[in-house]
Amino acid sequence: MRLLLASASPARRTILRAAGIEPLVEPSGVDEPALLAAAAAQGPVPAAEQVLLLARAKARDVASRAGVEVLVLGCDSMLELDGDVLGKPDDAADAVRRWHRMRGRRGLLHTGHWLVRPSDRAEVGATSTTAVTFADVTDAEIEAYVATGEPLAVAGAFTIDGLGGPFVSKVEGDPHGVVGLSLPLLRDLLGRLGVAVTDLWTLDRPAVPGAADDRTG
């Protein structure tokens, strides 16, 4: 049995590899804005439910084309600040505005996880939520960070395992969930399907430490 990651995120692959799991990778073709718009048309959708909705759609999309020898994992992340949901910034100017708003503040990073077993269509899912406190960074630090391009590709416009690490002063909860994939939650979901996380270990393959955060879906 192999884990098939329905995501192109290098950070999620790095987390899995460091935990002894070499995943197969097939990004989904889900239209995320359309899916969220359809859900919002039925009423307000909390951030923790939005990420779970997207993770489920991605896992199901890839599982529909996968063989029976795999478990398909879909993930999605968003930052919630004062009730507002923040995905990837639109551009550099948007990232700067976000950081002016975020600095010295506390937000919630939600990461939805959805696991599908194509062989019997069994599926489970849950959301990891971690509180993140941002440092009171200066205007110059914000401009320099945004100029690197790193915050433009990640949910919430920040990382904790890349250049943005010095600008996060506190993390309450699972830090892996902030990077994009909670290992304790994955273990729990696997257990609910009767699979031990150790069954997915591929220890003959070397772990790959260190990679920039990429909560891109």
Image: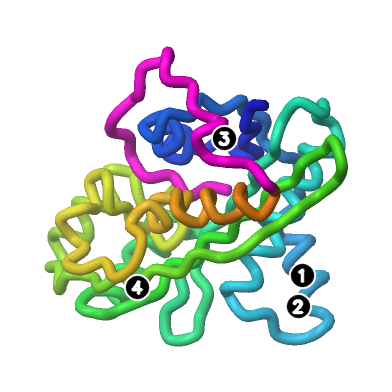
The type of residue carrying mark 3 is Ala
Left or right of 189 on screen, residue 131 = left
The label nearer to you, 3 versus 4, is 4
Task: Name the residue: 55% across, 55% down.
Answer: 188
Name the N-terminal-most of marks 1 and 4. 1
Mark number displayed over residue 37 = 1
Percent x, y of residue 76: 58, 55
Left or right of 163 on screen, residue 8 = right
Looking at the image, what colour scheme do you see?
rainbow
For the record, the magenta segment spans 194-217
Q: Which residue is denoted by mark 4 in the rendering?
A: 131
The majority secondary structure of the magenta stretch comes to: loop
Name the N-terminal-most of marks 2 and 4. 2
The type of residue carrying mark 2 is Ala
Q: Quadrant of residue 177?
A: bottom left
Confirm whether residue 23 shows in the render: yes
Q: Which residue is denoted by mark 3 in the rendering?
A: 8
Badge 1 marks a residue whose secondary structure is helix
Label 3, label 2: how many angstroms apart (C-alpha)?
A: 26 Å
